[in-house]
Image: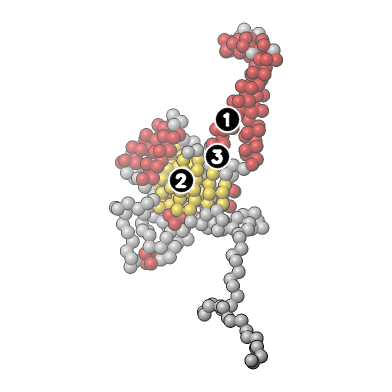
Amino acid sequence: MPDAVPRPAPDLTPAGLTGAAPAPTPAPTPSPAGSASPDVPTVVGPTALDRSLLWGGSPVVGAAVAFGLLHLAGWMVGLPWAPFQGLARVIDELLGERGALGAGICLAVGALAGLAFAAHAVRDIAVVTVDPERATLILRDDRTELDRDRVAAVLVDRKDLVVLGRRTPSPTDRQASPASPAARASTSDAGMAEGAPVDIPVVELLHVRTELATDRLATAFRSHGWPWHDDDPWVDEFRRWVPGDPALPPSADAVLRARAAMLRSDKTSDATELRRELARLDVVVRDVDKVQHWRPATPQR
């Protein structure tokens, strides 16, 4: 019987697969400057300090104000010439004359009022999530999503987050010819997608008070390649609205008349709805001390 000769182990590597195994993709880590990786969504919302000040400070301030009003009511009762004598006397009789019990009730009511204010204030702070393809804004019970390829500019105008871009094209919007240079062009500096209609006007896609710091919003949008601007690129085209302006479409002039009445009455929600209606009419409006300024929606430059 021949001697056993050790044989090499068979090569189990499938044909066509050679070389070292690929290294696993490392998890994204924050940059040294503190901003997230461009591939990781950035969330901008109320900070821990904001929540601490609201939930912790508001009850204290509410209790202090209520206690001060209690003493003010007792002082006013002794002054026949002081206004609101009836209300001051009721407060003094219900709480002021009950000593420590009345003071405790007053402090509790003030603290509860402060908590109610804090809950309302937190709901008024928006949460903005940004990634390279989409931005989402949640405010109260409303959720707004924006596609990056339709946005031309993002900015803050006097504490309001403003997003300018091309509205969803309607059947009447003229499409760019596939043979035209615009249709063959790649994505422009403003972020418009290749082959998209080039003559759809740029209107306001979003205009909302977020209560968020401008620098935090700017960092979030810039880190993901969105076109952030310090001011409206078309700010020089705004003009003060004058009723009956012949440059306006008749329907837009009627909407601006109605909106002016809403602004004078501080009906902000109705004015916001009419702002959206103006965007559908290709008109951009800007309010300066309740005075409306407008410009026509212009094609992307």
- Residue 144 in sight here: yes
Query: Dividing the picture into quarters, in which one does residue 77 lie?
Result: top right
Crowding at dot 2, Cα within 10 Å, few <14 / some 14-19 / many 20+, comes out as few
Between 275 and 110, which is closer to the camera in this rendering?
110
Secondary element type, mark 3? loop
In the picture, the disc for residue 125 is: 3
* Colouring of the image: secondary structure
Crowding at dot 1, Cα within 10 Å, few <14 / some 14-19 / many 20+, comes out as some
Q: Are marks 1 and 2 in contact (CB under 8 Å)?
A: no
Q: Residue at 64% across / 54% down in the picture?
A: 34
Secondary element type, mark 2? strand
Determine the residue located farthest toward the bottom in the rendered image: 2
Query: Disc 3 marks which amino acid?
Result: Ile
**Residue 300 x, y percent position in the rendering:** 41, 56
Mark toward the start of the polypeptide (3 vs 1): 1
Crowding at dot 3, Cα within 10 Å, few <14 / some 14-19 / many 20+, comes out as some
Determine the residue located farthest toward the right in the rendered image: 100
In the picture, the disc for residue 117 is: 1
Q: Residue at 59% across / 65% down in the picture?
A: 25
**Residue 91 x, y percent position in the rendering:** 61, 13
**Residue 150 x, y percent position in the rendering:** 43, 54
In the picture, the disc for residue 174 is: none
Q: Quadrant of the N terminus?
A: bottom right
Going by the image, does 298 lie left or right of 160?
left
Q: CA distance from mark 1 to mark 2?
A: 25 Å
Q: Would you name the residue on which mark 2 appears?
A: 144
Query: Disc 2 marks which amino acid?
Result: Thr
Q: Residue at 56% across / 58% down in the picture?
A: 38
Mark toward the start of the polypeptide (1 vs 2): 1
